[in-house]
Amino acid sequence: TTWLQEIVWLLMHEGDFEGALATPVYIRSPFLEFKDLTLNEIGLDLASTMPSPRVIKTHLPLKLAPREIIVKKPKTLEKDKPTTI
């Protein structure tokens, strides 16, 4: 999932490799349900302060997401098996 985070972030930021190198991936794409130990912040809090559009990493099933995520039609990527890309 980390590779996919990088690819999606770079696509959304027109291949800005300098920006990607300047900021760690766990800050650019926070893990929604975990606390970041280096920043001492919960991923949900980090994500809510980021400008839109955001890249957010989660392993939660889509059915646990807020209803708005379906209504607003964001882009979501799901893996059904660990070997699926």
Image (tube, rainbow, N blue to C red):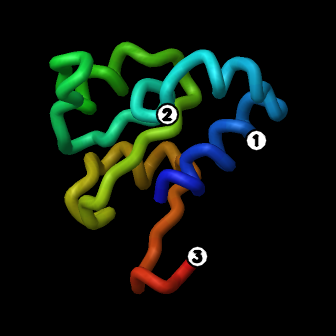
Q: Residue 59: where, in percent of width, then height?
A: 29, 60
Q: Which residue is labeled 3 in the image?
A: 85
Identify residue type, mark 1. Answer: Leu
Viewer-closest of 41 and 55 = 41
* Mark 2 residue element: helix
Q: CA distance from mark 3 to mark 1?
A: 17 Å
Q: Residue 83: where, in percent of width, then height?
A: 48, 85
Identify residue type, mark 3. Answer: Ile
Q: What's the residue at 52%, 16% (across, down)?
A: 51
- Residue 25 marker: 2
Viewed as shown, does residue 2 lie left or right of 14? left
Of pointers 3 and 2, the one earlier in the residue sequence: 2
Q: Residue 47: where, in percent of width, then height?
A: 36, 26
* Mark 1 residue element: helix
Front of the two marks 2 and 1: 2
Q: Which residue is labeled 1 in the image?
A: 11
